[in-house]
Image: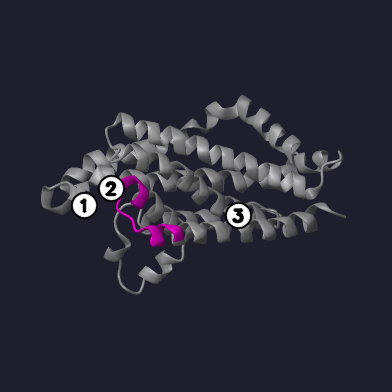
Amino acid sequence: MKAAFEYWLMVYRRTWRGSMFTSFLSPLMFLAAMGVGLGHLINHGTGEIAGVRYAVFLAPGLLAAAVMQTCMGEATWPVMGAIKWDKTYLGMLATPLSVRDVMLGHQLYITMRAAIVAIAFTIVTAMFGLVHSAGGALLAIPAATLTGTAFAAPVAAFAATQARETNFILLYRFGLIPMFLFSGTFFPVSQLPAVLRPIAWITPLWHGVSLCRDLALGRGQVVLMLGHAAYLVVITAVGVVLGLRSYRRRLQW
C-alpha cells in the first residue's frame, strides 16, 4: 500500500499546478461571489443567516463541497485511466503489490488530496476574516476530509466497473451538481420543499456540510455531530468493501 501511495504522490508533485483551479480557485470564487457579493442581499439586506454573516455561514459548506469535488475528480477518470489507458494498476500488480495494496494506496493518496484542499481552503477563509472560531475551523478540516473519503471510496468502486467514461458525465450531472446546490451548501435544507428534504438528508454531502458548519460555528450538538461523522464513516467503509470487490473483478484474471 505504501508503494502505491508513493507512486501517486510522485505524480502529484509533478502535476499539482494543474489542479489549482478545480480544487481551490473555483470554490474560492464561489465564496467571493456568493458569500461576499450576493451575501449583502440575504434576508432583506441584513446580510445575515443563522445569526452570522452569510459568507461565514457559506464558508464551511463550500469547504465540504470543494473536498467532495476534488475526491470525485480523483476517483473517476484517474481510476479508469489506471485500469484502461495507461494501465498503472496493472504495472503495480506486476510487482509484489496486491489488489488491496493498489486500491488502498490510491485511496490514501486521495485522502491526502482532500486534506490539502481542506487546509488550503481554511487558510483562505481565515485570510478573508470568515473564521467564526479558530478551534472550530481546525476541527472542520478533518471533518471535510472525512466527507471526501465518503465520496472517494464508493465512486472509485463504481469507476472500476466502467468500460467507458460516459457514465462519469451522468454522475456529475445528476449526482455532484444537485448535491452541490441542494445539500445545504448555500442555504439550510429546511428551506427546500418538504418532499425534497429527505432526499437531501441521505446524501453524504449534507452530512459533511452539516458537520463542518456545526464545528466551524461552534453551535452543533455533540450527538448530532457524532451521527454525521458515523454516517460518513459507514459510507466510506462500504465504499472500501465494494471497491475491493470491483477492483478484484476487474484486475484479477
**Are dots 2 and 1 in contact, CB under 8 Å?**
yes
Q: Which residue is mark 2?
A: 57
Give how far across and how far down residue 74 sits, in percent: 59, 43
Give the residues drawn in magenta, as a range: 214-226
Seen in the picture, residue 31 relative to 43 is either above or below; the reply is above
Mark count: 3
Residues packed near mark 3 inside 10 Å, few (<14), some (14 to 19) or many (20 plus)? many
Q: Of discs 3 and 1, which sits in the foreground?
A: 1
Looking at the rendered structure, the secondary structure element under dot 1 is strand
Query: In screen coordinates, is 241 left or right of 43?
Result: right
* Mark before the other along the chain sequence, 2 or 1: 1
Residues packed near mark 1 inside 10 Å, few (<14), some (14 to 19) or many (20 plus)? some
Q: Which residue is mark 3?
A: 155
Q: Farthest residue toward the front?
A: 222
User: Would you identify the image quadrant in which residue 27 lies?
Assistant: top left
Q: Which residue is mark 1?
A: 49
- Quarter of the picture holding the C terminus: bottom right
Mark-to-mark CA distance, 2 and 3: 28 Å
The answer to whether residue 238 of the structure is visible from this angle is: yes
Looking at the rendered structure, the secondary structure element under dot 2 is helix
Amino acid tagged 1: Ile
- Quarter of the picture holding the N terminus: top right
Seen in the picture, residue 114 relative to 253 is either above or below; the reply is above
Q: Residue at x 40, y 64 (%)?
A: 200
Dominant SS type (magenta):
helix
Mark-to-mark CA distance, 2 and 1: 7 Å
Q: Nearer the viewer, residue 183 or 219?
A: 219
User: Would you identify the image quadrant in which residue 28 lies?
Assistant: top left
